[in-house]
Amino acid sequence: MNGALANQCVALYARFSSANQRDASIEDQLRRCAAHVGALGGRVDDEMIFSDAAISGSSLARPAFERMMTFVKKGVIKVVVTEDMSRISRDFADSASVLRELEWAGCRLIGVADGIDTAMGGAKLLFGIKSAMNEAYIDDLRFKTRRGLEGRCRAGFSTGGLPFGYRTESAIAADGREIGRQIVVDAIASAIVRRVFGLYCAGYSYDAIAKLLNAEKVPYARLGKKFRRQGWVASSVRAILHNRAYIGEWTWNRREWRKLPGTNVRRPRARKAEDVITQTYPERRIIDPETWDRVRKRASAVSAKYKGKGGALVAPGNRTQYLLGGLLVCGTCGAAMVITRGTSAAYFVCGDHKKRGTCTNSTLLRDDVAQTAIIDAIRKPLFTPTGVTFLRKKIAERLRTRAQRAEADATERLERLRRTEERIHGLVKFIADGDDSKYVRETLRDLEAQARIDTAAIDEAKRELKSPVRLPTPEALVERARDLEKVLAADPVRAREALRGVFDNGRIEMHPTEDGGYVAKATFLPLAAVGEGDLGERTGDSPAAMPFHVTIPKPPDRRKKRP
């Protein structure tokens, strides 16, 4: 039988997106797919059945789907069967990416309901059209959802997350139906909000208010939610003091969330002023206008006093940035270590201990002592003959690997360009035959753009292969290390960025010792330190990565003892 699946490893994939859908939807999809596989003479093992429940198809970040693709990339799965292509993805770009990965792995994709089978001629064209239709469905759904939320907003009902101090309760119509969730003032939380405003008016800073509330174990804004940090912090206090909802002014649709192209990461973006809806609800007012105005006047005065270059808020005398600022984290709790001023020097201390009082690590780390110890430890593997020999060996290995990858990438892109051009010719013929729809035109433009990208990448790969990077001499490596040393000594801002690049994840863990000192632990990336970070030396997974372990003793007490 044509297309038979006998003796092939077949996987089934099913998904539904909403928590309101019934779980049987998954079973229905799998049953239909299994029947199709059986009709083609195949069978499916239980461990090759994958399903994601209540997860949107607009993202590829799905546990079961990612697990299935891992087996595909390893060459275990040879055929993937799903009910239709919208189960795989409703995003056009993601769908194309998945298809490319399946093609590369030699894996066949079958959609039972929409008749797509990548082993058949014309399947890619049909797949592209179907993917465009699936994305159009998501766009339409997004529009209708936003329209519905706008209706809820204009009717005075809740549309989602609420500021601290409010809760929702059912709004019941005359016939007993729930017509929405109305927003009401929460008695307990609103009292905390009033206290925060009162403390600020009394002269307390954001940080002082947070510490006071934590010391009194006052319930905080995100209590019960999945956040690593717990307790009040200055930023949460500031958010309350700047929220106009507490004087009864509510806004909706101030920003939208957009997916970063090529990733599953979403970023906020401000909407146009005319799209923002502002409404006034006196019954939701927690703070009176007089208190609000007093807070605004004090906040403006503080901002004017401590405003530095570019509008950034800084404390007096702290306009130069510390070399290790942002790199050190507490080895006890994982929080960032922050600067605190002593009588004669600057010290680092655990941020959670200072801001929240929730970490037991109160040991101070003198800034200049830590700088000296860490920079000296960086210099050692860069200037010794053994260290230079090690670096040249790793650079040679990386250069060979990069050349091999460049050649393989050029070959892959040539093949992909050939396939893309075939699809373009197919779409042009499709249009010539009378189908001049919007989706076909958009698909054609996307394919032409992909062809241009691949052509440029192929030209760049050819140029790279013609002029490969040479292995640096020992003298050149030592000179590069000296350049790093000069940066560390001359410019604190550039130096901090340089240090961030030579440690995995840009961080150094500081573990306190019993004698009042610290042990610095990190993963050092020596190739990045000598300017070879473009060879892939950016993470601790690199074979050239080295453990970084430095003991920083407690500085001696130089205060004069009284007789």
Image (cartoon, rainbow, N blue to C red):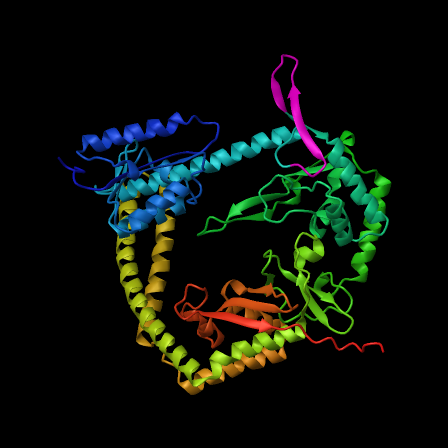
User: Is 111 on the left or on the right of 16, as rendered?
Assistant: left
> Does 166 lie within the magenta span?
yes
Q: How many marks?
A: 0
Quarter containing the C terminus: bottom right
**Residue sitting at 24 percent across and 49 percent down?**
106
Residue 173, picture quadrant: top right
Q: Position of residue 19 (x, y in %)?
A: 48, 30
Quarter containing the N terminus: top left
**Residue sitting at 76 percent across and 40 percent down?**
193
Range of residues picked out in magenta: 162-180
Residue 68's place in the image compared with 477, above or below, is above
Residue reaching furthest top? 175
**Residue 496 in sight:** yes
User: Is 280 on the left or on the right of 522, as rendered?
Assistant: right
Q: Closer to the camera, 276 or 519?
A: 519
Residue 156, picture quadrant: top right
**Residue 463 in sight:** no
Q: Position of residue 302 (x, y in %)?
A: 81, 57
Q: Closer to the camera, 463 or 190?
A: 190
**Residue sitting at 51 percent across and 36 percent down?**
142
Q: Position of residue 499 (x, y in %)?
A: 55, 71
Residue 407, picture quadrant: bottom left
